[in-house]
Amino acid sequence: MKKGILIGLIGIIGFAGNSFAQDRTKPQEGRQFEKRTPAERAEKRAEHMQVDLDLTDEQTKQVTSLNEEHFTEMDEIRAEMKKLKERAKAAQEAHKEKVDAVLTAEQRKKHDEMMAERKKRHEMRKRECHQEREVE
C-alpha cells in the first residue's frame, strides 16, 4: 500500500514538473523591444546612472553626451558587422557552388551528408556549452 502511494506521488511530481517546464524552442518569442534612437537610449541610461550614482546635473549632461556618442558608434559597428556577415554568407555560398561544380553527383551527395553531420555535431556542442554556462 505504501509503495503504491509512493509511486503515485512520484508520478504526480514528475508530471507536474514536466508541465511547468519551459519550451526553449523559440527563445525570442514575446521579447520585442521598441527601437530607440541613440539619443533616447543615452538619456535613459543617464537617468538610471543619475539615480544609482547620485550624479550632479553637470555630470548627467556629460554622461548623456558620452553615452550618445557611444551608442551612435556602436550602431555603426553593428551595421558594418551585418554587412560583413552578409558578405561572408554570399562568399560561402559561392564557394559551395564552385565545389559542387567540380564534384560528381555521388560525391556531391556524400559531401552534403558529411556537411550535415558536421553541422549536427556543431549544434550539439553549442547546446552542451550553453547548458554548462547555465549551470555556472
Image (spheres, grey):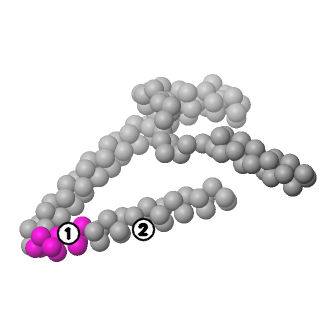
Total marks shown come to: 2
Q: Does the stretch in magenta take in 105?
A: yes
Residue type at numbered disc 2: Arg
The residue segment tinted magenta is 103-112
Describe residue 3's horizontal placement relative to residue 58 as left or right: right
Residue type at numbered disc 1: Lys
Above or below: residue 13 compared with residue 61: below
Residue nearer the viewer, 64 or 18: 18
Q: Does the stretch in magenta take in 136?
A: no
Which image quarter holds the C terminus? bottom right
As drawn, the label of residue 32 is none
As drawn, the label of residue 109 is 1
- Residue 39 in view, yes or no: no
Q: Position of residue 112 (x, y in %)?
A: 24, 67
Q: Residue at x 63, y 30 (%)?
A: 48
Above or below: residue 27 compared with residue 3: above
Above or below: residue 118 compared with residue 15: below
Question: In the image as oriented, which residue stretches furthest toward the right?
Answer: 2
Residue nearer the viewer, 42 or 82: 82
Q: Position of residue 28 (x, y in %)?
A: 48, 39
- Badge 2 crowding class, 10 Å Cα cut-off, few under 14, some 14 to 19, many 20 or more, is few
Q: Residue at x 15, y 73 (%)?
A: 106
Q: Residue at x 63, y 55 (%)?
A: 134
Describe residue 79's horizontal placement relative to residue 10 as left or right: left
Pointer 2: what residue? 121
Label 2 secondary element: helix
Label 1 secondary element: helix
- Badge 1 crowding class, 10 Å Cα cut-off, few under 14, some 14 to 19, many 20 or more, is few
